[in-house]
Image (tube, rainbow, N blue to C red):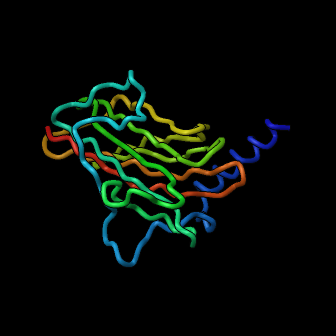
């Protein structure tokens, strides 16, 4: 029975990728033109201890978000807001080196979630991240990334779906590598 439920959930995720997800949370905010982005030199606490160390020429970028009472995804600065009702989690992307990208999604919701998304680069590469089941956080690395002279940008985006079929759109997060 559990496999049937998960199969149905995964099918819904695939439909969401190829159709306009009418049930997805809205990430637009009329008052904010850009999401709040945090660039740091260290990985978040929730990253695994064996995560590859970032390249000193690359950025580590994290976006924190929650879903408000209207179902909108709202980004926030964790330094300014000590308490956030409905805190959904964070998304992080960073350059391990000139050919590898590290990424991670964390959810503060209880229970099994499915993440579907992608990492894209300004050099035209697309790396799909499909149907990843997780409870708490997920992440990994992407190898064989093409970089050229100048700014190389990688962007992580996607959606999480919980066991009840509720979709949460993660805000896009981008990191740059200068070659």
Residue that appears at 57% across and 50% down: 160
Q: Is residue 157 above or below residue 49?
A: below
Q: Position of residue 45 (x, y in %)?
A: 38, 35
Report the side of 92 relative to 73 (left or right): left
Q: Nearer the viewer, residue 148 or 22?
A: 22
Q: Nearer the viewer, residue 140 or 89?
A: 89
Report the side of 36 relative to 64 (left or right): left
Q: Quadrant of the C terminus?
A: top left
Q: Nearer the viewer, residue 103 or 120?
A: 103
Name the residue at the bottom extreme: 30
Q: Position of residue 114 (x, y in %)?
A: 61, 44
Q: Quadrant of residue 16?
A: bottom right
Name the residue at the right extreme: 1
Task: Report how many numbered discs are placed on residues in the image.
Answer: 0
Q: Quadrant of the N terminus?
A: top right
Residue that appears at 39% across and 23% down: 49
Q: Quadrant of residue 126?
A: top left
Q: Position of residue 19 (x, y in %)?
A: 61, 61
Q: Is residue 45 above or below residue 125?
A: above
Residue that appears at 35% across and 42% down: 93
Name the residue at the top extreme: 50
Q: Position of residue 154 (x, y in %)?
A: 31, 45
């Amino acid at each position: 029975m559990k496999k049937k439920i998960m199969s149905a959930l995964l099918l819904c995720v695939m439909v969401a990728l190829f159709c306009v997800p009418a049930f997805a949370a809205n990430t637009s905010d009329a008052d904010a033109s850009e999401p709040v982005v945090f660039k740091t030199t260290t990985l978040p606490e929730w990253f695994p201890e064996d995560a590859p160390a970032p390249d000193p020429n690359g950025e580590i970028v994290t976006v924190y978000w929650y879903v408000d009472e209207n179902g909108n995804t709202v980004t926030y600065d964790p330094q300014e807001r000590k308490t956030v009702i409905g805190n959904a989690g964070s998304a992080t992307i960073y350059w391990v080196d000139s050919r590898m990208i590290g990424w991670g999604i964390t959810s503060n919701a209880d229970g099994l979630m499915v993440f579907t998304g992608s990492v894209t680069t300004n050099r035209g590469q697309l790396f799909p991240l499909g149907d990843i089941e997780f409870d708490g956080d997920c992440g990994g690395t992407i190898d064989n990334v093409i970089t050229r002279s100048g700014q190389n940008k990688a962007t992580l985006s996607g959606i999480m779906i919980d066991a009840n079929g509720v979709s949460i759109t993660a805000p896009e997060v981008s990191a740059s590598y200068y070659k």
